[in-house]
Image (cartoon, rainbow, N blue to C red):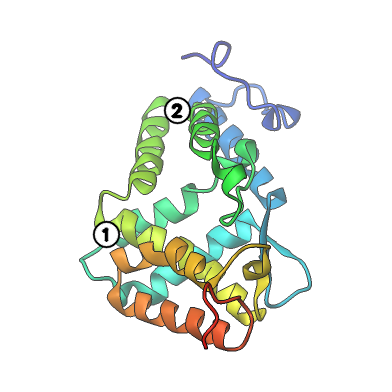
Amino acid sequence: MSHDDRPTPEFAAAVPQPDGTPERLRRQIEFVIEVDQLKNVLRQSPLLAADRRENDAEHSWHLALMVLVLAEYADEPLDLVKVLAMVVLHDLVEIYAGDTPLYDSAAGADQEERERLAADRLFAILPDDQRDRFRALWDEFEERGSAEARFAKAMDRLQPLLLNYGNRGGTWRTPGVTDAEVLARKSVIGDASAALWDYARTLIRTGADRGWVPRAEPEA
């Protein structure tokens, strides 16, 4: 696909590249510029270090650091470079699809379709070989069919859990959310690490004990 007939990255188009820029480099730089928008995609999770919500770029950085720090707790051997690529790439589609809150079932009804279409559009900016490789990594993360994808997803679920616990509830205070739902939504952590799932359940149980998340069935 030539520069003239491929999808136009609208945000990156506002930063025209110098004449004579090689086509491959042009497409790569346009992608890098386009995904700068990730810094403006707000998530629901409140930060620990500031009185504001986290953005997607901050979330992705935190996941990458967690992979490096916590990889020893994975139940299966990991290709760390692959896991890092997944956690950096997985939320880029939210530039076009928007963030879907974990505890909003209505918003999640069409999430898969919105994000699939966004992936089609976003990765097409890249040279074809990188488009195919990055899209395959994104699909693998979504499908959780490999040890790397399961661990990447576990980090994606554990990180906001830490933020909610540190904020004495955070998004756990969404109307209708209970400790049972939090446990159900976070259970994928256990697919990658028994140790981290045990820790996550302790956080949720402690949060319920302290009244930061309602119990599904209050204790007698």
Which residue reaches farthest right? 51
Residue in front for this viewpoint, 87 or 172: 172
Residue labelled with disc 2 = 127
Residue in front for this viewpoint, 89 or 74: 74
Q: Is residue 5 visible?
A: yes
Q: Residue at x 77, y 67 (%)?
A: 52
Residue type for callout 1 = Asp
For the image shown, how many numbered marks are present on the structure?
2
Of circles 1 and 2, which is in front? Answer: 1
From the top left corner, tell me how far across and down residue 142 is, in percent: 39, 45
Q: Quadrant of residue 200?
A: bottom left
Q: Residue at x 45, y 69 (%)?
A: 183
From the top left corner, tell me how far across and down residue 153 is, in percent: 40, 58
In terms of secondary structure, where does tag 2 sit? loop
Q: Is residue 64 visible?
A: no
From the top left corner, tell me how far across and down residue 110 is, in percent: 54, 35
Q: Using a 10 Å C-alpha cutoff, classify the residue at mark 2 as few (fewer than 14 neighbours), some (14 to 19) or many (20 or more).
A: some
Residue labelled with disc 1 = 79
Which residue reaches farthest front? 220
Please say if 177 is above or below 165: above
Q: Quadrant of residue 133?
A: top left
In the visual, does 18 lie left or right of 192?
right
Residue type for callout 2 = Pro
